[in-house]
Amino acid sequence: MKLVAITGSIGCGKTTLADEVRLLGFPVYDADGWVRRLYRKKNFIRVLLAAFPAVEAKGVVDKRKLRNIVFENPIELRKLEGLTHPFLKDNLRCLIRKNAGRQGVFFLDAALLFEMSWDRYCDYVIVADVAYDIQKKRVMERDHISAEDFEKINRVQMSNELKKEKADIVIDTNRPRNVLRAEMALLCEELR
């Protein structure tokens, strides 16, 4: 098994690259998808609401309120990470165990790859990159948030400049989709 990570800061095009790899027929494991599933588990919701009672909205988690709390306060962010990161780590370990004896290239789509030190499990790390002003515009339009909210989110993530220094491969995502598709196809062939 060859494990290749795709990462990058919010709005840098990580998901676009992962989608292209998926279209090429490679398995892509999505850490954000793991988190979305976690937020649907009743036991987790109960624990989360006990830790953050202000984010309850009719028995579910108001993610916007939660985001505002954790991006304003590093202590609260660490508390949330303490609840979610063990679950994510268990999923990663399961993925590695399940595929350890298999041939082929497997991709991991993980925004916080370096922050969680998951790069040590990967054979290669691809970082999606784009100019800061494009990144900011993408996130504001996609998530319908203000420039101030974007800055809060971006501030708590490792900078993309540092991620690029740690990467094996950096891909500029500010290019037409067909160009990215061709680049990812070539890269996947080389990784095989």
Image (cartoon, rainbow, N blue to C red):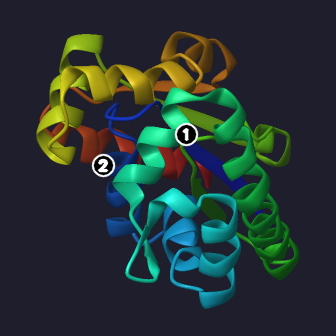
Q: Nearer the viewer, residue 30 or 77?
A: 77
Q: Where is residue 64 shown, x and y percent of the image?
A: 35, 52
At horizontal 38% and vertical 81% (from top left) the residue drawn is 58
Amino acid beneath label 1: Val
At horizontal 72% and vertical 63% (from top left) the residue drawn is 88
Residue 28: in sight, yes or no? no
Q: Nearer the viewer, residue 99 or 149?
A: 149
At horizontal 35% and vertical 19% (from top left) the residue drawn is 151
Whichever of labels 2 and 1 marks the residue nearer the N terminus, that label is 2
Element at label 2: helix
Look at the picture and state if 36 lies above or below 111: below
Amino acid beneath label 2: Thr
The residue labelled by disc 2 is 16
Q: Is residue 145 left or right of residue 28?
A: left
Q: Where is residue 99 shown, x and y percent of the image?
A: 79, 76
The residue labelled by disc 1 is 70
